[in-house]
Image (cartoon, grey):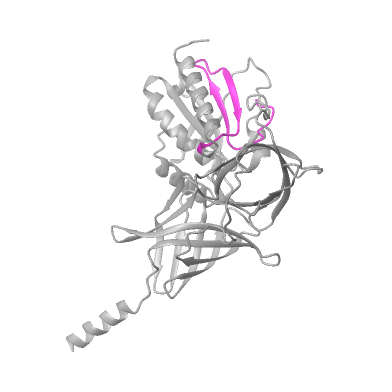
Amino acid sequence: MMKLSLLLVFFSVIGVAQPKLGMWRGILLLNAEKNIELPFNFEIKKVNAKLIVVIRNAQERIMVDEVVFTKDSLNFKMPIFDTEFKTELIGDTILKGVWINHTKKENNTIAFIAKFGNKNRFNVPMKRATNFYDGSWETTFSPESKDISKAIGVFKYIPNSAIVEGTFLTETGDYRFLEGIETNGKLFLSCFDGSHAFLFIAEHNETEIIKGDFYSGSIWHENWVAKRNDTFQLHDPESLTYLKNPEEKIDFTFYNTQKQKVSLSDAKYKNKVVIIQIMGSWCPNCMDESAYLAKVYKQYNQRGLEIIALAYERTADSERATANIMRLMKKFDIGYDILLTGLTGKDKASESLPFLNVVMAFPTTIFLDKNHQVKSVYTGFSGPATGKAYEKYSLKTENLINNLLYNKD
């Protein structure tokens, strides 16, 4: 009887399909009617007998370790962002289900399917690349409309391939790590990071003008055009948001994750250089800046630097907002205070910080000297996907910090 029971357990275990380990190709179906599909690649592997999902975007690797596997499903929650995949495992090579974005109240579910073994991001005929798109492009989104905006497209080819990587820099941030291919004169780029679901499709004409479509999530679509221009610049990010009264000393009070009141005027911040980060855990550019500021804090805190982040979450549920912030802090080992404002959106951020003319972007970063006089207000963030722009920002920021710490003009 004991042997029979053991055999039943054995056969029940081996009968349960396991997702194949290795590379997968996932698709988010953004628009079923128009068959608009956003592809991305990910790897399923085991670390210490635990299933891990690693999402790939160009040079970025996003490790997802909140994975729950049962006999017929594989569900995983994205790190930091309040989104998750719920999927059914079909055999051992297909996952089918949905991606759910809990930060949205409407249109927050997108159909998802993934297949094992396909390393190509885009399933289009591969032809020899022309390297046409390589370089810097003056870009206009939604041309000839009231929503017109400018950006800089920066693209580069991976040597000896048709693979293209790059991003768009805007006055409120960047489009993070885009990856795709050029084939037959057409450009295909995508990014999925748990919050962004971006798809770009474009082609060029004989006058070297790029024309394309941009899709984001399940509902957003806009046209864009670009022309090669190595000298085009966006507005100075330190000119967009500013102190209404340059002589005013600012202050605020919000609660930290332990439900304790924290004010800029607290003794902890007296005679300290302070960076104020206006952000949200749902914001990918804020995530990049938080990763950067966590390192800056470790480097300069003992020399007299403090950082305070003001979180404008997309939920009115304080417990959920706190949980989201705690996940962000754990992910990047953040040692500085993140305060929960209990408010949502740029308009509410502007109202809660009336000393500023406007908060037009998350993140927005304020640099204070030891007397808490505002020395700089920086709109947006150029993250690691921007390459030289990120290096330039990092150098400028750390020079400013050093100057403020040592009272240099």
Q: Nearer the viewer, residue 185 or 257?
A: 185
Q: Main secondary structure of the magenta part?
A: loop
Q: Nearer the viewer, residue 155 or 108?
A: 155
Q: What stretch is highlighted in magenta?
A: 355-384
Q: Which of 244 and 134 is in front in this view?
A: 134
- Which x, y percent locates residue 347? 68, 38
Residue that appears at 36% across and 22% down? 302
Residue 148 is one of the magenta-drawn residues: no
- Residue 280 seen in the current view: no
> In screen coordinates, is 93 left or right of 203?
left
Residue 371, compared with residue 15, is above or below; it is above
- Which x, y percent locates residue 352? 63, 33
Residue that appears at 63% across and 24% down? 238
- Which x, y percent locates residue 406? 44, 12
> In screen coordinates, is 230 left or right of 311?
right
Q: Nearer the viewer, residue 238 or 353?
A: 238
Residue 107, compared with residue 321, is above or below; it is below
- Residue 157 seen in the current view: yes
- Which x, y percent locates residue 265? 51, 23
Residue 312, compared with residue 252, is above or below; it is below
